[in-house]
Image: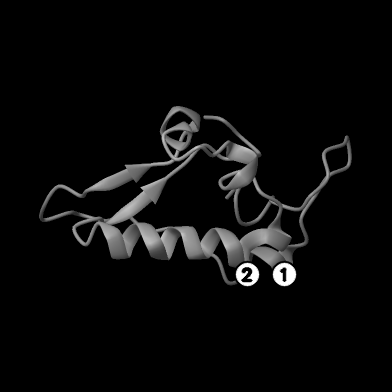
Amino acid sequence: AFESVFHDVLPGPFASVADRELHDRCASILRLRRDLTIVPLHAPDLRRWSLKPGDLSAAPSRHYKKTARWAEAIHRQFNDVDGLVWTSNMSDR
């Protein structure tokens, strides 16, 4: 939710999201049939590629095309990767 719904909402006492922004979003529970291979993109992991969170996982939305190319490159390089995980810029939980 923090990376999609609240990504561009400026913090403040009256920060909110319109109901229409939530209408097409939902949550699901998945039952996995196998363990997933997930690539971590936390700060220590990014340093191995000489990157900082601001270069990739904490980049502003206007840089999404560039960050999407990183995701595509990771998936091409490691064809057994099922997904990526990173610390949200909006919430580090």
Residue in the picture at 59% in, 63% down: 66
- How dense is the environment of label 2, judged by Cα within 10 Å: few (below 14), some, or many (20 and up)? few
Q: Position of residue 81 (x, y in %)?
A: 25, 55
Residue in the picture at 60% in, 50% down: 3
Q: Is residue 26 visible?
A: no
- How dense is the environment of label 1, judged by Cα within 10 Å: few (below 14), some, or many (20 and up)? few
Between 83 and 5, the residue placed more toward the observer is 83
Residue in the picture at 52% in, 37% down: 87
Q: Is residue 42 left or right of residue 17?
A: left
Residue in the picture at 22% in, 48% down: 37
Quadrant of residue 24 within the rendered picture = bottom right
Check disc 2 and report its element: helix, strand or loop.
loop
Asked if residue 41 is positioned above or below residue 63 in the image, the reply reads above
Contact check, label 2 and label 1, Cβ < 8 Å: yes
Quadrant of residue 12 within the rendered picture = top right
Give the residue type at disc 2.
His
Between 13 and 71, the residue placed more toward the observer is 71
Q: Position of residue 43 (x, y in %)?
A: 50, 31
Between 46 and 11, the residue placed more toward the observer is 46
Q: Position of residue 25 (x, y in %)?
A: 55, 65
Per the rendering, the mark at residue 42 is none
Quadrant of residue 32 within the rendered picture = bottom left
Check disc 1 and report its element: helix, strand or loop.
helix
Mark 1 — residue? 20
Asked if residue 12 is positioned above or below residue 70 in the image, the reply reads above
Mark 2 — residue? 23
Q: Is residue 1 visible?
A: yes
